[in-house]
Image (tube, helix red, strand yellow):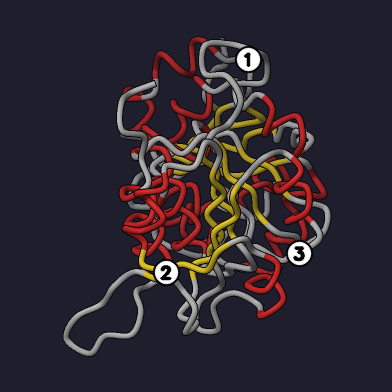
Amino acid sequence: MAVPVTVEDADDPRLHDYVSLTDVELRRRREPAEGLFVAEGEKVIRRALQAGYGMRSMLLTPKWTQVMRDVIEDSPAPVYTVSPELAERVTGYHVHRGALASMRRMPLPDPARLLASPAGEDGPSGPARRVAVLEDIVDHANIGAAFRSAAALGVDAVLVTPRCADPLYRRAVKVSMGTVFQVPWTRLPSWPEGMGMLREAGYLTAALSLGEDSVDLDELAARRPRRLALVLGTEGDGLRPSTVAAADVSVRIPMAAGVDSLNVAAAAAVAFYATRPATPR
């Protein structure tokens, strides 16, 4: 059991993992290189631990030490208590949830293995029947929202392209409510070359696009493909033309009132719902 230690100096090296959490460029470089990510809030920390991630340390404001008492008792990782003012100085923002944890990353699975068995081993879930591919999405809130929808609507796995934002960045994890730990995911080594891997694995690749030759989402859902990969593009520009050209089918969500498109996170939720299996697996 770790004994909480009070820290009063913002420059204390023991708080290194939590410095400048709002500096996206710094954290984007540091966290993967140092093998860590930051979980924020009681529920997210607990879900990360339940998913098997190891804790490096925990940073709490005093009123949260009792709430997290069982976690403190179960983990040998050091626990640091700081005032709310010091937490803000270290992290760069008001930590209103009062609990942060530095967690150890796990190695990302091989994409082909993930598609073959999203649970990591052959089991009752079987091979991934429905996957989402997130192409070059850079907004962490959209990443988190897409993962939350994927978890809620039964998507078996998520693949992110090389230029996509980090699903384990603090804001993405927070918006996902920790479901990023629940949905199997990995990063593709190259794209759109990865489209060929999906096709070889038996997926119908469906690019969400506003092209003139796009079919309505309801039409795609009615086909009930045995294996389906839904490909969603970055904010603003959408999917690359090369991605749309390489897909088996281009799909649009019918719009009313002169609206031409939805936010990518909202589009993901609609597409996941429309293509959900007819019966529970």
Q: Residue at x 49, y 42 (%)?
A: 225
Q: Report the amino acid beneath label 3.
A: Pro
- Which of the labelled discs sits on residue 76, or is there none? 1
Q: Residue at x 63, y 15 (%)?
A: 76
Q: Nearer the viewer, residue 20 or 277?
A: 277
Mark 1 vs mark 2: give the one in front. 2
Q: Could you say where residue 146 lies in the image, as x and y percent from the top left?
A: 44, 54
> Gap in Å between the C-alphas at discs 3 and 1?
43 Å
Is the Cβ of the residue at disc 3 closer than 8 Å to that at disc 1? no
Q: Could you say where residue 151 lies in the image, as x and y percent from the top left?
A: 41, 38
Quarter holding the N terminus is top right
- In the displayed structure image, the side of residue 20 where residue 28 appears, left or right: right
Quarter holding the C terminus is top left
184 in relation to 74, above or below: below
Q: Which structural element holds mark 2?
A: strand
Q: Report the amino acid beneath label 1.
A: Pro
Residue neighbourhood size for the residue with mark 2, other residues' Cα within 10 Å, grouped as few (<14), some (14–19), many (≥20): some
- Which of the labelled discs sits on residue 215, or is there none? 2
- In the displayed structure image, the side of residue 281 where residue 259 appears, left or right: left
Q: Residue at x 32, y 50 (%)?
A: 274
Disc 3 designates what residue? 192
257 in relation to 57, above or below: below
> Gap in Å between the C-alphas at discs 2 and 3?
21 Å
Q: Earlier in the sequence, mark 1 or mark 2?
A: 1
Mark 3 vs mark 1: give the one in front. 3
Q: Which structural element holds mark 1?
A: loop
Q: Could you say where residue 157 lies in the image, as x and y percent from the top left?
A: 56, 38
Q: Nearer the viewer, residue 143 or 278?
A: 278
